[in-house]
Amino acid sequence: MSAVADPVAHRAAVNIKLTGLIASGSVALAILLSGFVLHEPAPYDIYMVALVGIWALFGLKLSRAAAPMTGLLVLFNIGGLIAMTQMAELADTPLYLAVSVFLAFTAIFYASVAETRPGLLPVIFNAYVVAAVATSLMGIAGYFNLFPGAEVFTRYGRASGVFQDPNVFGPFLVLPAIWLLHGLMTGSPARMMLAALPLSVIACGIFLSFSRGAWGLFAVSVVLMVGLLFLQSDSGRFRLKIVVMTVAAVTLLIALALITLQIPGVADMLSERARLAQDYDSARLGRFARYGIGFMVALEHPPGIGPLVFGKIYGEDTHNIWLKALLDYGWLGFSAYLTLTIWTLAAGFRLILRNRPWQPYLLCAYVVYLGHVGLGTFIDTDHWRHFYLLLGIIWAIIALETRYQNQPSQGDLDHGELRL
C-alpha cells in the first residue's frame, strides 16, 4: 500500500510545486512588464488580458471579502458608459472606457491571486523592484544621453524611463523605493547593503523625473512609513534603529541630490520645476481655473459629459481625479470612486499595525496608495497601471485578514495556505 501511495504523494507534491512556480513566474512577468509602457497598447496590457483570461479558466476566485472593491469598480465603469451616451461623437471614447474596464480587472486579478496565494506578495514586490531599477536606469541613461538614441527615454528634458510621461514614471517608482527603504530600516545588515544600491538608482530616477507629484509622493510616503514603524514598535532599541537609519537614508538621498546638482542643466531644471505654481497652473484657463469650471459643468450635467470631452473643449483635461470622475464617469462613477477610496483607506488603516506575516506589504502599499489619493487632486490617475496594483494588494490583504479572523484557531495557519 505504501509503495503505491508514496509515488502518488510525490507526484502530487511535484505538481503543487510546479503550479506554484508557474503562478509565481506569470505574475512576476506581469509586474516586470508594468514598468515598460512607452506605447499603447503596451506589452503589459496584451499580456494581462491573456493572463487574466487563462487564470479565470483555471479558477480565478473572487472573494466575498474583496467584493466591495469589485462592485464599486463595476459601478465606476457603468458610470462611464452612461456618460458616453451624452456624447455627440464617440471618437476614442470606447477604447478609453475599455482600458478603464481592463484596469479594473487587473485590480480584481491581483486581489484574487494574492489572497489565494499569499506567497505571491514577495514575488510581486521583488519583481516590482527589478522593473523599477530597469526603467530607472533607462531614464538616467536618457537624461544624460549615455548612448545613441537614449533620448527616447526622456520627455520635455526630464527622465521618463520606458514611460510616455515623466509624471507617471516618477510615481511608478515610489512603491519599490518605499519597500527598499522599509528593508533598510527593519532588515539585517546584509539586507541593508542589498537594498542600498537599488534604492539609490530608483531615488535618482525619481529625482530626474522632475515630477513635483513624484517628489511629494515619495516624501509623504517616507514620513508615513517611518512614523508607522515607530508607532508599531514598543522597543526602544528598534525605535533608535529607525531614527538612525532614517538619518542615514536621508543623508544618502541628500548626498545623491547634491552630486546630481553639480551636473550642468540639472540645477536649472530643478529651479524651474521646484516652483509651487507653474505658468500652466495659474494661467487664465490653467489647471486651477479649470477646477472651478469643471465643477460647474459637473453640476449642470449629472450623468457626466463623457470621457475626454472636457479636454477637447478647454484645451487640456482636468488634471484632477475627482473632477475627472465627475465629468467622465458622472455622479454615479464619482460616488463609486469616492466610496471605494474611503472604504480602502478605512479598512486598510484598521489592519496596518497588526502583527501579521503580510503587514510589511500592507504598510508600504497603504502609505503609497494614500499618497496617490492626495496626488489625484493635481493629476489624473485613473489609467495608471500601478495604481490598480496598489488597490489589488490592499484588498488582497483585507481579504487575508478576514480569512485569518475566521480560522478556528491560530495554529491552523501553520498548515494552511495563509503563510507567506
Image: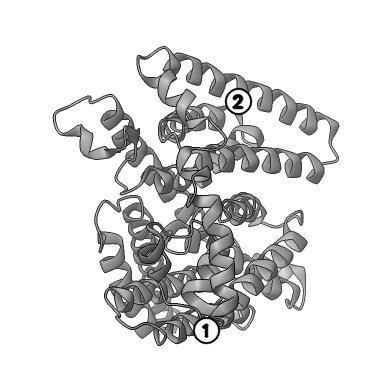
Residue placed at 30% from the left, 53% from the top? 37
| 2 and 1 marks in contact (CB < 8 Å) | no
Query: Relative to residue 131, is residue 413 drawn left or right?
Result: right
Q: Is residue 260 left or right of residue 44?
A: right
Q: Amino acid at mark 2?
A: Ala
- Give me the C-alpha separation between circle 2 and circle 1: 48 Å
Q: Nearer the viewer, residue 52 or 159?
A: 159
Q: What type is the residue that disc 1 sits on?
A: Pro
Give me the residue at 37% from left, 46% from top.
131
- Image position of 236 (left or right of 363): right
Residue that badge 2 annotates? 249
Which residue in the protein does label 1 denote? 303
Q: Position of residue 154 (x, y in %)?
A: 29, 37
Q: Position of residue 290 (x, y in %)?
A: 52, 57
Secondary element under disc 1, as helix, strand or loop, is: loop
Q: Position of residue 282 (x, y in %)?
A: 53, 43
Q: Is residue 5 above or below residue 243?
A: below
Colouring convention used in this rendered image of the protein: one colour
The residue at the far front in this view is 284
